[in-house]
Image (tube, rainbow, N blue to C red):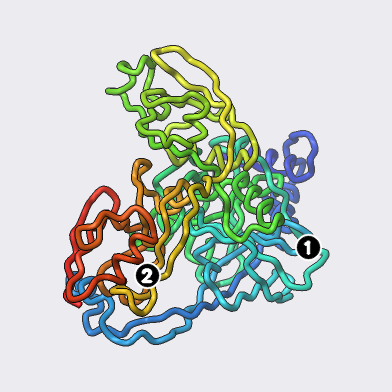
Amino acid sequence: MFRIAVTALAISLAGIAGAETKVPQNQTEIALGFAPLVKEAAPAVVNIYAKRVVNVRNSPFGGDPFFENLFRDFGNARPQVQNSLGSGVILSDDGIVVSNYHVVGMSTDIRVHLKDRREFTARVLLADEEADLAILQLEDARDMPFLNLRDSDTVEVGELVLAIGNPFGVGQTVTSGIVSGLARSGVATGNARGYFLQTDAPINPGNSGGALIDINGDLIGINTSILTRSGGSNGIGFAIPARLVAQFVEQARAGFTTFQRPWAGMFGQPVDADMAQGLGLERPGGIVVSDLHPESPFHKAGITPGDVILEVDGQPVNTPSEMIFRMSVAGLGEEADILMVRDGDEDHRKVQLDVAPETPARETVTTGRRSAVPGLVLSNINPAVLGQFGLPLSIEGVVVEQPGEIGTRMGLAPGDVLRAIDGTEIATTRDADQALRAAKKRLTLDVQRGTQRVVMRFRL
């Protein structure tokens, strides 16, 4: 038992000093534990207090499992201030900070408190709800303590790690553990979707946006969520890898306000044991391509439905989330090396990474007062719209970008596709605008939501 503890401490002390591994020589060195590492890294982890104004409806049906959804727009909306508490990590001496979207997203007032009791106002440079990441800039900040980013692809299961954050608002807290797993996708809770590192270092509410560091004090991930039934830590926590954080910082410095992901223009599914043999694979793994958009960069590289994608830039991909992560960390404008299998034969293809094209033009239209549904924001469907709303690749026509107040009451939602209005097929936003203005006493909308089609009838 004592030998194991000494070995772990030897590793940690060697990593801190950047020297060769050695056994602690005396009781003082053993007692130090992670103290030198925490003393160096903790000043770069901050507490974040954010406020946002939201419209809340005081409905008598609140909490009812049936009527709450049916009467979700019942009652008058009143502005209400919501407070959120979380953590963040300083990544540069000029005050660039990374945190979670669910901590600071849509906030109107953000205050950042440092360990040395200094306080700064912050503004959001770039935020993305899907990745649950946000990049902040501290106002009038200079000579800030900061953590270096480590390439998270070099992280291995079993490495010692520390989680630093502000759980439950009690103040900065440090917990220790190991890296429990890599390439976790589709398992995190909350807003985040994608690819995560897993750790057993205790993470609790308020730790969100805090640092997961290695024994050298380098940042390997941003703590984002846990799996729990009680609300407390059960030893299953997830962190967003530092490689993705690096791309967020790069785009924020380039002036982007939303994260730009490379567009795949492709649908696929994981290869299981039943599919592997038929696809010519020795073992299950990879993603079998099921559909491709004509403008997809994978289609342009010669990949076709039925092909299996095994790796992106030498890293295995076994779920669509993993593939999008690998494309995202490679960076826009780069070429990704794709290892694929077709009829049992492996081959490499180069895929150009870029955002989804905005062709044909969206030609966005907002319906006016004379429309049967005023305030409806409509756009023509193109690859960028497909990616924005996650629509089927083969779909064409007009999408609802914003339903407006009246459209919401009618049951329309962002991402709905208008296939026909009063029996007339809709191909462009101009068609939709004219049809809605021509509606008189009755209105029939043929709407596609995901893979389902619904006919809505209204009396005007």
Image quadrant occupied by the C terminus: bottom left
Residue 342 position by quadrant: top left
Q: Which residue is mark 2?
A: 376
Answer left or right for 237 relative to 136.
left
Q: Find residue 94 and name its label.
A: 1
Q: CA distance from mark 1 to mark 2?
A: 42 Å
Answer left or right for 10 relative to 48.
right
The secondary element bearing badge 1 is classed as loop
Residue placed furthest toward the right: 143
x, y (%) of residue 270? 37, 32
The secondary element bearing badge 2 is classed as loop
Label 2 Cα crowd, 10 Å radius (few <14 / some 14-19 / many 20+)? many
* Residue found at x 54% / y 55%: 223
x, y (%) of residue 138? 71, 69
Answer left or right for 427 relative to 109.
left
x, y (%) of residue 32? 71, 52
Answer above or below: position of 39 versus 396. below
x, y (%) of residue 25? 77, 41
Residue 355 position by quadrant: top right
Image quadrant occupied by the N terminus: top right
* Residue found at x 45% / y 26%: 309
